[in-house]
């Protein structure tokens, strides 16, 4: 993987293809695997740290690599998880940023601390989960979030962010802003209410429990159902490179919705608490004929039009070209702008 390693842990000229689930090619000028906070401080004091751009990588499941990266990559593998505190109403469960998200969810459920099961099988790390406020099957991370610890990439200062400071939104947080991107998340604490009820409102999930009394459903059953749905619908990055949903679901105003419904009465739409309406990007892309279609080595998945896949040998430029063609077609047919979800590096 590397030609040489410095004592602080930098490896030079590192192949990044195995570090992103899209399987896109590119080499980093240098990369260090971070397993301790002390080592992190040591790395940030080396001259290499000030040489070129910086990139924090967890599982690489939400990045589009544009090619070679001319700076420093920190691959976060900080480990550890525990029950940090509990009170009459809640358990506060803590995990280090490098913990695998799905393993962490499975562990909480096995410990008898449910609440995260709807988010099972989302790839990646605990530390990246707050970045875009991961969400699935009727739950967003923000609903179970207590606080996180982060280290400044500029001056190594440490800070605790509570829920308000994170400014969570749909696939969004302060960490996606220019100022927020200067923080490296080291650990996250989740607040899991002792009083648990299954959240089965998402149509696909409700279907799994059809005919059953929801009151008797156990957390592990919800987790298994979510895992089963995801395995049916989403391509496994180990077999077919991808970064999950490539575009966010567009949020429009009621006037835009009315215009769209006049043309397409079967358009799926989900009213939001603030009066806006979320559309299904997958449906818009599907209706433009992109499901299963390819442009060069990149295509829309045959079972989920919102997932762009690497059919082999794709580069970041190929992904951008396919994404631009899809954005163009959706804009031309529906007058709706699609916004990519992953981070472009
Ligand atoms: P990376 O891809 O490594 O990084 C993503 C971003 O976070 C980058 O900007 C990176 O710099 C930053 N980052 C990573 N770690 C840290 C850290 N410790 N501190 C500061 N910044 C950091 N997402 C959903 O929300 N819902 C889904 O249902 C879902 N399904 C998916 C299904 C598949 C098959 C795939 C491939 C992806 C899916 N995703 C989903 C997207 C992705 O899994 C999540 O966004 C996940 O949280 C990314 O974790 P990661 O560790 O791989 O992050
Ligand atoms: N649909 C189509 N064609 C398709 C696929 C879906 O018309 O090819 C329609 C479905 O019939 C449904 C609607 O689109 O009416 C929504 O589809 P789905 O339930 O599969 O969810 P999604 O909106 O495509 C979102 C998230 C996923 C998350 C699932 C489940 C975004 C951008 N995506 O997908 O998150 O797992 O809901 O909650 O919000 C991710 O962010 O990477 C991701 C995978």
Image: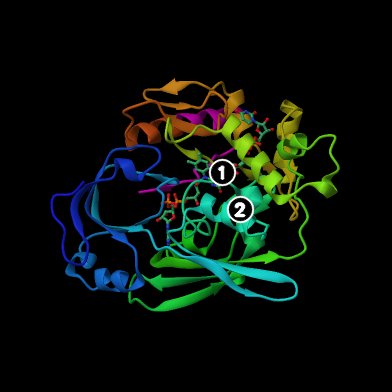
Ligand 2 under 8 Å from disc 1 Cβ: yes
The image position of residue 203, as x and y in percent, is: 75, 38
Q: Is residue 88 above or below residue 172?
A: below
The image position of residue 175, as x and y in percent, is: 48, 62
Q: Give the quarter of the image for residue 225.
A: top right
Per the image, is 333 magenta?
A: yes
Q: Is residue 205 above or below residue 54?
A: above
Residue designated by label 2: 170
The image position of residue 59, as x and y in percent, is: 41, 49
| Label 1 environment density (alpha carbons within 10 Å; few <14, some 14–19, many ≥20) | some
Dot 1 and dot 2 residues touching (CB under 8 Å)? yes
Q: Element under label 2? A: loop
> Magenta residues?
325-345
The image position of residue 295, as x and y in percent, is: 41, 23
Query: Can you see residue 83?
Result: yes
Residue designated by label 1: 248
Query: Can you see residue 252?
Result: no
**Mark sitting on residue 295:** none
């Amino acid at each position: 993987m590397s030609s040489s390693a410095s004592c602080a842990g930098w490896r030079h000229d590192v192949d990044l293809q195995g570090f992103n689930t899209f399987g896109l090619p590119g080499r980093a000028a240098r990369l260090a695997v971070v397993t301790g906070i002390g080592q992190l401080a040591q790395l940030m004091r080396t001259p290499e740290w000030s040489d070129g751009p910086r990139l924090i990588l967890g599982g690489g499941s939400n990045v589009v690599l544009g090619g070679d990266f001319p700076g420093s990559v920190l691959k976060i593998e900080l480990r550890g998880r525990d029950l940090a505190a509990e009170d009459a109403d809640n358990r506060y469960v803590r995990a280090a940023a490098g913990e695998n998200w799905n393993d962490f969810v499975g562990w909480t459920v096995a410990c008898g601390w449910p609440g995260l099961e709807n988010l099972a099988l989302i790839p990646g790390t605990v530390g990246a989960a707050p970045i875009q406020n991961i969400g699935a099957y009727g739950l967003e991370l923000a609903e179970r979030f207590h606080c996180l610890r982060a280290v400044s990439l500029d001056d190594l200062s440490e800070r605790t962010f509570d829920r308000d400071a994170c400014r969570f939104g749909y696939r969004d947080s302060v960490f996606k802003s220019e100022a927020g991107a200067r923080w490296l998340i080291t650990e996250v604490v989740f607040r899991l209410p002792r009083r648990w009820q299954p959240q089965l409102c998402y149509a696909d999930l409700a279907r799994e429990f059809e005919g059953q009394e929801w009151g008797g459903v156990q957390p592990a059953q919800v987790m298994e159902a979510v895992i089963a749905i995801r395995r049916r619908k989403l391509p496994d990055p180990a077999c077919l490179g991808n970064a999950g949903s490539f575009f966010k679901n567009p949020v429009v105003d009621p006037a835009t919705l009315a215009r769209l419904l006049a043309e397409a009465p079967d358009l799926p739409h989900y009213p939001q608490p603030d009066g806006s309406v979320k559309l299904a990007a997958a449906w818009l892309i599907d209706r433009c004929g992109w499901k299963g279609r390819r442009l060069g080595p990149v295509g829309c998945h045959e079972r989920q039009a919102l997932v762009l896949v690497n059919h082999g040998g794709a580069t970041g430029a190929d992904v951008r070209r396919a994404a631009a063609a899809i954005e163009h077609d959706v804009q031309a047919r529906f007058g709706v702008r699609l916004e990519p979800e992953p981070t472009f590096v």
